[in-house]
Amino acid sequence: MDGLLAVGLKSLPTDARPREKLLARGPGALSDVELLALLLRTGIRGKHVVQLAQELLEQFGGMAGLLHTGADSLKPVRGLGPAKRAELLAVLELARRALTQRLQERTLMHNPQVVRDYLQLQLGGRQHEVFAVLFLDSQNRLLALEELFRGTLTQTSVYPREVVLRALHHHAAAVVLAHNHPSGSALPSRADEALTTTLKSALALVDVRVLDHFIVTRDQAASMAELGLV
């Protein structure tokens, strides 16, 4: 690791080592810092791996913030070489795929928290606005997630025709709309409400229902349906 002497988990007392603790008591017994230290395995000269894990969580706003962080943001962090960055990104991708599988196998709207978790993993860490659509079958199971538009989203920059075409392509019976607010505010704007109304009208022409529209930030995903706006 850049020629620096690593300070790893083996230097800890046996009863304080995350791996031994996990095997003895289960993963739920570990703190976020311990889980991350277990993944990182080694620190750098003068900084124990547990300290490195703690600083990473503080820098990126906890485990959720770290998992939402892209490769470019991780690259400048001292102590995170290519191998460690690849492992962190792989963990994120595994989480995404696990949630995708759950949504494909189960009726989507029976577990809205899974939908929130999924959308936060997909969109929560983006630095620019992304508009995405979850296409659902007649049982409200996930067929596909597509990111259709990027940039500053307005009613005129999200094209209803394209959303309708993609819904027909997937033979979708319903959709869940989602876009992120990089500002961190999950409150729907008037433009969000107008866009939702426009898309509901367009999709209704091809008998596709809009079930919800989520506003996603790093910390939460707000449901416009729960707010009475869909």
Image (cartoon, rainbow, N blue to C red):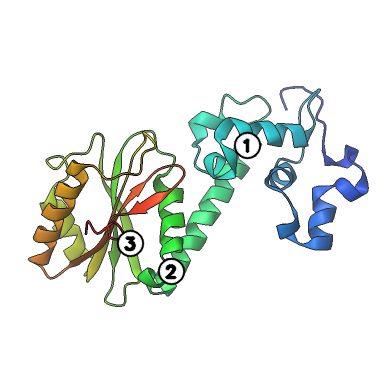
Q: Is residue 137 left or right of residue 110?
A: left
Q: Quadrant of residue 143?
A: bottom left
- Residue tagged 2: 111
Picture disc at residue 144 = 3
Residue name at image x 23 percent, y 42 percent: 189
Residue name at image x 37 percent, y 35 percent: 182
**Residue placed furthest toward the left:** 205
Looking at the picture, tell me which residue is in the foreground, 201 or 82. 201
**Amino acid residing under circle 2:** Asn
Residue name at image x 80 percent, y 31 percent: 48
Q: Residues within 10 Å of mark 3 (few under 14, many from 20)?
A: some
**CA–CA distance between discs 2 and 3?**
17 Å
**Amino acid residing under circle 3:** Ala
Rendered location of residue 146, percent (x, y): 30, 53
- Residue tagged 1: 57
Q: Does residue 172 appear in this view?
A: no
**Residue placed furthest toward the bottom:** 139
Looking at the picture, tell me which residue is in the foreground, 16 or 143. 16
Q: Earlier in the sequence, mark 3 or mark 1?
A: 1
Instruction: Say if 170 sits above or below 123 in the image.
Output: below
